[in-house]
Amino acid sequence: MKAILAVSFGTTHKDTLKKTIEKIEDRIREEFKNYEVRRAFTAHIVIKVLKTRDGIIENTPEEALEKLKAQGYDEIIVQPLHIIPGEEYEYVKHVVDNFRKQGAFKKIILGRPALYFKGEENVPDDYAIFTQAIREILNKEGTIVMMGHGSNHPANACYPCLQSVLSDQGYDNVYIGTVEGYPTINQVIARLKKASVKEVTLVPLMLVAGDHVKNDMAGDDEASWKNILKSNEINSNLYMHGLGELEKFQNIYLQHISDAINDSYSGVGQTKKGGCFNG
């Protein structure tokens, strides 16, 4: 028996869960009818909140794989719904490696996140595919500031890499910042001031529009990006939608699952090279 495990950071916000993660899972079921589709969250705090607040039980990657093993599934595709191959992806990779070493399944393959390869050495250009998938956002009028999560993990380099790709494509009106990495909002503001920008549209560079979007980006607290920009005399319009709502963005994960099933780029995260970050 075969199964696909869709693994995301997770969210406690039911509205964006339905529009993004659940929608992607439904599309996986439609596309890969011979596979059982399961869910796992990497954020243990999200799992705890859902259990305490709503009585909803979500599985960690370990728990989900243990259940699949106990139920007799022997071919598993683990597909991360993360943007970059950062800490959460490394966590999933570690779990998959452990199950592989145990010989728990006849076959277990880890797919790649949205941004991974840069197109060299006969691998896909995930960055070009990514920008094409969010073209309807990039083509909005005016200046766009995209808020990524960010990390102290080396994979944070994916954000500056994406910024360079956007510049190469002529999107000099798009600025990328992160909540917990580089560039920070203050560094973005310095660039906006240099370009004499007075108004921007804030856009999540995230799968879901959850806590970070509703609070860190658009919240009423003085530390929100909206208010930090306002204190610097830059007005903000708010785009309150996770990238996971876009059908073309959802297609990225469907393609990565197909790549994993076909062993198109076996060894992702282990031996293959060619991206801005190769894990």
Image: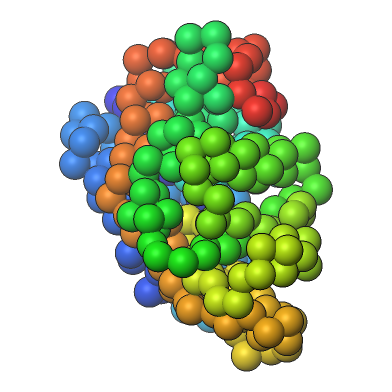
Any part of residue 57 in sight: no
Residue visible at 73% across and 81% down? 232
For residue 77, what is the image quadrant?
Answer: top left
Q: Quadrant of the N terminus?
A: top left
**Scheme by which the image is coloured:** rainbow
In the rendering, at what x and y percent does residue 96 appear?
A: 59, 29
Q: Count how many numbered circles sit on residues in the image.
A: 0
- Looking at the image, which is closer to me, 113 or 118? 118
Asked if residue 225 is positioned above or below residue 274 in the image, the reply reads: below
- Looking at the image, which is closer to me, 51 or 122? 122
Residue visible at 56% across and 20% down? 268
* Side of 141 relative to 12 (left or right): left
Residue visible at 44% across and 62% down? 242
In the rendering, at what x and y percent does residue 146 appear?
A: 56, 60
Asked if residue 167 is positioned above or below residue 76 in the image, the reply reads: below
Residue visible at 19% across and 41% down? 30
Asked if residue 62 is positioned above or below residue 109 in the image, the reply reads: below
For residue 279, what is the image quadrant?
Answer: top right
- Looking at the image, which is closer to me, 275 or 93? 275
For residue 33, what is the image quadrant?
Answer: top left
In the rendering, at what x and y percent does residue 253 appear?
A: 39, 38
Q: Residue most toward the right?
A: 152
Any part of residue 190 in sight: yes
Asked if residue 5 is positioned above or below residue 209 in the image, the reply reads: above
